[in-house]
Image (spheres, grey):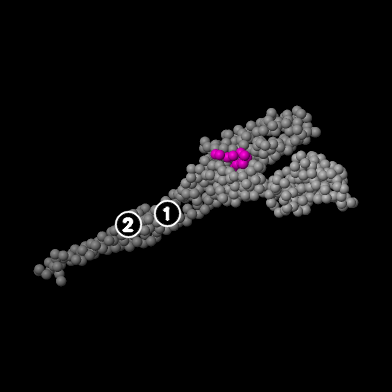
Amino acid sequence: MTRINTNVPSMIARQRLNRSGDDLQIRLERLSTGLRINRGKDDPAGLIISERISTELKGINQAIANSERASSVIATTEGSLTEINDLLNSIKALTVEAANSGAISDEERDANQLQIDSAIQSITRIANTATFGGQKLLDGSLGYITSGVAVSTITKSNITAASFINAGSINVSVDVIASAQKGSLYLSGDNSAIAGPPADGIIVSATTIQIRGPLGVRELDLLSGTTLSAVASSVNALAGLTGVTAELVSATDQSSGLAFRSAGFGSDNFVSVERLDKPANATLDNFNLVKIDGNADVPADIWTATTVAATRDEGRDVQALINGNVASGDGLQISVGSPSLALKLDLAESYATDPALAVSTFDITGGGSLYQLGPSVNALQQSNIGIQSTAAEALGGVFKNGAANFLSSLQTGKANSLAAADASRDYSTLSEIVDASIDEISILRGRLGAFERNVLEANSRSLQGAFENLTASQSLIRDADFAAESSELTRAQILQSSGTTVLSLANQQSQQVLQLLG
């Protein structure tokens, strides 16, 4: 049939031409933008996942920058700690030199004291001035703030991590479940079972004993008839060489017996008392040592406990629960470490040795430094770390004579100055304070180094890998394939050209009707 009112071939050709024109427009748009998805209609599902990946990439990119910034903070902090460490080592050398009192003059000791004073002042100055971007690093600003710490139960606290997610403060409870103990051996003062009988509270026969402790070993010759209090005095005179002390079980009763104890608490401390000879007449032998059977707590009257013969006994670390979790014990010190709470507490002797005492509690109310290390803001992608003050007034903290002794006490006129130590002929406390200060700074540097290496750097590498993979995934979803698009462009151009030609022919077809009209 031949019609002129409706040119169907022209309509078909025009529709196809429009399609090829649209396709040509899409190819030109993709090649000009480099993107396969420019609008939602291009690929709705692809657009959704691509935008989600874009959001993740933004978060990851910022998290990488956060980690790098945190590494800079840690590196700056450690640089200052290195200087403090060097100053403490110089103080250590000066105290060791001053202890050589027989070979240096008073003027030299005074010169050493001046150097110690200046070093201590420099340590405090560094602690107060070390900054990063205006933020103080070592003055305690990055340490945690505590409230309600009872000095009768906790002599020193060091909180290294605490998470305040969904909490304005953190309550910490400490419950001693097994007491700290010293290594202890006991010698009875009851001589009634010996033939004679001799008086109670004396050494019946002359003997030589070897005393061994964590510091060293010494021998002690005891004469027949020596009272137990005199034996205790002789043992205590050697305590600085052996680490072993002695005292009557009952301070006013010789017959109560003698207790040999390690100077410190914990499994690293021990006492060993061994007899090197035996009397010819065994019936006169009353030097038989015992210890508490097992590892039970020592009762007020040790002779009511079950005892076993022994020449050596080790101490026991305190065992405690912190917020219901078993803490690691080391002498009188307990610690826990987790992402939500990490701390180290020095317990008072009276508290650590009496599990019957009430639970001790305190609050962590704020402070510390929070690092956002992941692309999402939640506790799993954050890390908390506390940096305590490293001023001289906060370093050391050795508990002696009922009080904590800090590095600042080594300055001129203070309780642990060189002059005071020389007057008492006892440099041990001074040395312990310096050693404890060095340990604190070294441990802090190690903790910061571990944080930088195992947390920050590992986090950066992980995020960089994720960034690369997500970028590749987004490119696969959204970017245009230029080879494919170029081919499609050529096809669309050819279809556009041929469509135009076909439409022209279709429009000419109606004019052929005129030939039928003559």
Residue type at tag 1? Ile
Residue 125 position, x and y percent, is 60, 33
The magenta stretch spans residue 149: yes
Q: Find the magenta span and give its range.
A: 147-158
Residue appearing at x 61%, y 45% in the figure: 357
Residue occupying image coordinates x 26% and y 61%: 17
Circle 1: is it few (<14), some (14-19), or many (20+) Cα within 10 Å? some
Where does label 1 land, which residue?
Answer: 53
Residue toward you, 211 or 410: 211
CB of mark 1 within 8 Å of CB of mark 2?
A: no
**Callout 2: 10 Å neighbours few (<14), some, many (20+)?**
few
Disc 2 secondary structure class: helix
On the image, numbered disc 2 is attached to which residue? 41
Q: Is residue 205 left or right of residue 48?
A: right
> Quick one: 8 or 198, which is closer to the camera?
198
Q: Position of residue 208 (x, y in %)?
A: 85, 47
**SS at badge 1:** helix
Q: Is residue 75 visible?
A: no
Query: Of callouts 1 and 2, which one flags the residue occurring earlier in the amino acid sequence?
Result: 2
Q: Quadrant of residue 349?
A: top right
Report, in whole angstroms, how far the alpha carbon at label 1 lies from the one at label 2: 19 Å
Q: Nearer the viewer, residue 437 or 203?
A: 203
Q: Nearer the viewer, mark 1 or mark 2?
A: 1
Q: Which mark is residue 491?
A: none
Percent x, y of residue 405: 66, 36
Question: In which quadrant is the C terminus drawn?
Answer: bottom left
Task: Kindly tell me whether residue 199 is visible in this rendering.
Answer: yes
Q: Is residue 63 magenta?
A: no
Q: Quadrant of the N terminus?
A: bottom left
**Residue 212 image offset from top left, x and y in percent:** 78, 47
